[in-house]
Image: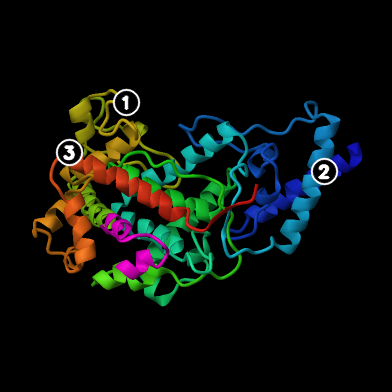
Amino acid sequence: VELAYMLAKTALGLLVAAGSASAFAPTLSGGLSAKYTGAQLRSSASLQPGSSSVAPSMSMTDDSAAQRRDFLRIALGGSAALAFGDSANAVVSFDTERYGDKELKVALINQVKQQFRALYEKKPELIIPLFKLAMADALTYDPKTGKGGLDGSVLRKVDPSLEYLQPAIDEVEKVRKDLLSKTEISCSDILAFAGSVALEATGAPRVKTQLGRMDGKKPQPQSGLMKWDPTKPTAQGIKEAVMGSGLSAQDAVVLAGTVGQLRNAGAAMAKTLSEKVVCNPEEDDDCQSEEEGYYGIYAPVTILSETNKQFGKNRGASAVNSNVGFDSARIAGLAGDAKFGNGFLVAVAKGEDKSELGKALMSDDELKKWVLEYGKPGNGNSNKFSKAAVTTYLKMVELGRSDVR
């Protein structure tokens, strides 16, 4: 058993490395227990600056005989899965233990969020495309058949009607390749976090996105988002896109309101960045130091910080949103008054928003009812909508969920 264990462990290390080489290659993580994830098997794995922990390497001296036998059984099963491909399901398979214990999961979440926060700070014009990319994958779910859901399939074959999302797909591939040099993560989990960080980075409450999606192998049903025209949306198209996946008219308005608010926030952030003031953080207390930015494939942005003006140097919970923390709050500060809330729906309800999306929402009685409900002025109503946006997003990205253990 000892010799077989050593041979299997060596072979598995090679297989993990090979499996990580491609952004869309099948992974072993679905076949490994919580104790033996790909991240733990990479002795050289490291975290980006600012992450909370480093994945431990497996120690031979700490393994009991029972653990060695268990590892051998898992390794052989996992090797076969990589060699011949996992059995493809049309549902979204979840393995909540695929990334290891709580400490490893937190470290992975930190890395993924760090990448997308940095991206949105540098390229706020990608907030909408990346959020819609998550929507496109999630809204493949068909409640009549139980097939579909967010499983990464939108990245493999892009329908011509969704080609406007190609810049977002390109960024997801960049992020995944960078993460694969340090750890293991599915495309579908990356997509889920792309959307959730878009919310947090513009000022929404914390989005507790669940890790553990396993990328699908079979073609999924057509995405409902194909019916939501990006330039001239209609009430019918919005309803079919969202309600076709089993969600409600209320959810449709919340998602539409989210898209509208993200559009406004992204535009405001882009304007702020275009007018940024070059400053010296050592001489100006309101200057944002690059050292407080992010690392990885996106360069940090140095800018005169509205967040610092309002909250000083306190990096704790008193930032714009205590549930999000300083980093997301600092980025949301770039949006100013356009940071996440119900501002878009308030303008639509008052007839002040002249966008095609606003017109579509007010042209349908069922949708208009919820626009008027969520489009009431006041901080309390804005918070109510923000919480609804988080809840609806999480509901959407878990459509078709099927736990494997």
Left or right: 322 in relation to 20: left
Magenta segment includes 56? no
Q: Could you tell me residue 283's position as x and y percent?
A: 21, 25
Please say whether residue 340 is visible from this viewpoint: no
Q: CA distance from mark 1 to mark 3?
A: 24 Å
Per the rendering, the mark at residue 72 is 2
Give x and y (percent) for residue 312.
Answer: 22, 24
The residue drawn where x is 28% and y is 36% is 330
Badge 2 element: helix
Work out whether 221 lies above or below 313.
Answer: below
**Marks 1 and 2, the one that precedes in the sequence:** 2
Question: What's the distance in space between the residues labelled 1 and 2, CA to CA?
Answer: 46 Å
Q: Nearer the viewer, residue 333 or 142?
A: 142
Compute the Cα span from label 2 to label 3: 57 Å
Q: Taking 69 as reference, is 105 left or right?
A: left
| Mark seen at residue 379 | 3
